[in-house]
Amino acid sequence: MSIRKILLRYLFLPRPYFLRKRWFSEEANANGRFNADHYISHPWYIKPTLFERWSLKSLLLRLAGGAIPGDAGDKYMPQGYIISEIGPEALRGKGESDMQVTREKLVNEKKIGCPFSGW
């Protein structure tokens, strides 16, 4: 067990930032929404670009009968997402006022740090 611990600690370092797989865009698009960069089965939040529609992966998905970005219209939300809209269709957009009240409360509260720091 100690050999495994040494190997994991010193030989299997984290990937450098430029080699990491990026699943979502880091900056918002023109609409203030974020897009996904990859998908596995359904193209949720994928912008239907020329490359996304005609790449090798897309062609193989077409042959297998899978969904391609842009084929289903707005079903998979190609315009992107914002955090408050993620979830089931029936709950989309609900709870924003409660979230805003909680956010205001947390911002205006006195920040005391760790509750156990006074011991």
Image: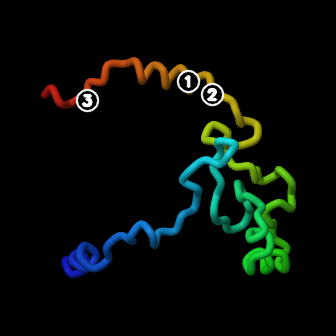
Q: Which disc is residue 8 wearing?
A: none
Q: Is residue 116 above or below residue 25?
A: above
Which one is nearer the viewer's eye here, 79 or 67?
A: 79
Q: Are marks 1 and 3 in contact (CB under 8 Å)?
A: no
Q: Alpha carbon of mark 1 to alpha carbon of mark 2: how far?
A: 6 Å
Where does residue 40 sit, x and y in percent of width and height?
Answer: 67, 68
Whichever of labels 1 and 3 marks the residue nearer the N terminus, that label is 1
Q: Is residue 38 above or below residue 3?
A: above
Residue lying at 73% horizontally and 61% vertically, measured from the top left:
43
Q: Amino acid at mark 1?
A: Gln
Q: Along the horizontal axis of the image, is 107 left or right of 115?
A: right
Q: Along the horizontal axis of the image, is 101 left or right of 78?
A: left
Q: Amino acid at mark 2?
A: Glu
| Quarter the C terminus occupies | top left
Q: Secondary structure at mark 2?
A: helix
Q: Are marks 1 and 2 in contact (CB under 8 Å)?
A: yes
Badge 3 local density, few (<14 within 10 Å), some, or many (20+)? few
| Quarter the N terminus occupies | bottom left
Q: Secondary structure at mark 1?
A: helix
Residue lying at 74% horizontally and 80% vertically, measured from the top left:
56
Q: Is residue 66 above or below residue 98?
A: below
Residue lying at 82% horizontally and 51% vertically, measured from the top left:
75
Whichever of labels 3 and 2 marks the residue nearer the N terminus, that label is 2
Which one is nearer the viewer's eye here, 85 or 22?
A: 22
Which one is nearer the viewer's eye here, 29 or 95?
A: 29
For residue 111, which quarter of the picture? top left
Q: Which disc is residue 100 wearing?
A: 1
Where does residue 110 sit, x and y in percent of width and height?
Answer: 32, 19
Q: Which residue is mark 3?
A: 113
Q: Which disc is residue 96 wearing?
A: 2
Q: Secondary structure at mark 3?
A: loop
Q: Amino acid at mark 3?
A: Gly
